[in-house]
Image (cartoon, rainbow, N blue to C red):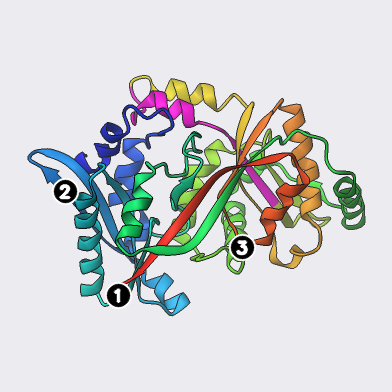
Amino acid sequence: MKFIKFPDRLYKDCPQYVPALHSDQVNSLTKVSTLSYCKRKMWMVMDGKKVVGRICGMINPRYNELYNKKRARFGWFDTIEDFEVAKLLLSTAEAWAKENGMDEIHGPLYYNTLGKQGMLVEGFENIPPFNCLYNFPYYNDFVTRLGYAKECDWLQYKVRPNQPLPEKVARMAGLLKQRYNLHEGSLSELKKDKETVRYFFNVYNESFAKTVYNFIPFTQDEIDEEASSVLKFVTDKSSTVLLDENNELVAFGITFPTISKALQKCRGRLFPFGWIHLLKAMRNYDTVDLMVNGAVPKWQNTGISAVYHSVMSRKYHEACTTTGITNPQIESNGAVNVWDKYENELFMRRRCYIKSI
C-alpha cells in the first residue's frame, strides 16, 4: 500500500493528477492473469520511513518472442524532484533486467497493451482520461539524462464530437450502409452473451495485431478479465457495434463518459462515498473519452470508418456531448489523420523511452 499510495502524496497539490483506485492497483500488481506468464519486481526508495520514489520492472516473454527482442519494461515510475532518486530507481530496474538476460529496457509501459503507458511530454495543463498516466515535466529530464531515447510517441486530441459530419464522409457512410445492409447491434444484448463477448474481444485482437505498435495479443484469461471490468461502463448511448446482413460483426466504437474528475474526488477509494461520484459521472455525457474503434480485418481499408463516424456523430448529438478526448494513438499510424476532418487540438503527447543495457 505504501507503493500504491505514494503518488497520491506526491501529487496532492497537482490539480491535473487523477488517482487510480487503490483496489484496481492491488489487483494489477498481485492478481491479474498476465502475471501467470510475466515477471515483475517492485522497488521503493526510502528516506527514513518516507517513500520518495517507486518503480516496477517487468518482462513479458510473449512480447519478446513475438518481436524477437530481449526487452524489459518499466512502469509505475514516480519520483520526487531529485535526480539521484530517479537514477537509483532506473539503474536498479536495469540491473534486474540485465540479470534476467535482457539487453534493452523501455517504458513507461504496462505488462501488456491494456494498461497505462507513455510518459507525458506535452499537455501538462490538461486532466488526462482515467486510463492514462500523468507525470511532472521533470520526469522526462531525468530519463533523458540517464541515457533514454525516444522509441515512439502517442498523440491525443480534443475534438467536438457532435459537430456535423463532413459531407464526403456522410455520403460514403450512406452508400456503404445501403450496399452492405449494415445496421447497429445492441450492446445491451451483446453483454448478456458470454460467447459473443469473447468473439468481440477476439476480433479486437485480430483488428489491432498489425496496426497497433508493440501490440501483444491477449490471452483468453486476459479477455475475460477485460470484459468483466470494461463492459459495465459500455452502453448503447455512447458506443456502437456495426453488423452486416448476417448479423456478423463489422466494426465497433467504444466511448465512456469521462470519470477523471470523479476519480479525483474519490481519492483512490470507492467507499464510503467514492462510488457516488463515479455513478454521477457515468450519467453525464457532456465530455467523453473516445476509447477505441476498429473494424474486423476483412472490412479494414474499405471506408467502413465513415459508417462508424456517422453513427457515433448521431449518438453524440443525441447525448448532448460537446467534448471528446481521444485515446492515445501512435503518431506514425495514418488513422490519426481522421481527426484532421474535424475541429481538433492536440491535447496530450506521450512518449515511450528506450535504452540499451
- Locate residue 334 relative to residue 132 in the image: left or right: right
Decide which of tag 2 and tag 1 comes sooner along the chain: 2
- The image position of residue 170, as x and y in percent, is 87, 45
Residue reaching furthest bottom?
Answer: 68
Tell me if residue 258 is in the magenta stretch: yes
- Locate residue 304 relative to residue 141 in the image: left or right: right
Q: Which residue is drawn at 20% across and 39% down?
A: 2
The numbered mark at residue 332 is 3
Task: Name the amino acid type tagged 3.
Answer: Ser
Q: Name the residue under label 1.
A: 102
Task: Name the amino acid type tagged 2.
Answer: Val
The quarter of the image holding the N terminus is top left
274 up-or-down from 147: above or below: above
Q: Residue at x 67, y 54 (%)?
A: 336
Which label lies toward us, 1 or 3? 3
What is the magenta range?
252-271
The quarter of the image holding the C terminus is bottom left
259 up-or-down from 346: above or below: above
Q: Are marks 2 and 1 in contact (CB under 8 Å)?
A: no
Decide which of tag 2 and tag 3 comes sooner along the chain: 2
Q: In whole angstroms, how far apart are the C-alphas of marks 1 and 3?
A: 27 Å
- The image position of residue 207, as x and y in percent, is 63, 63
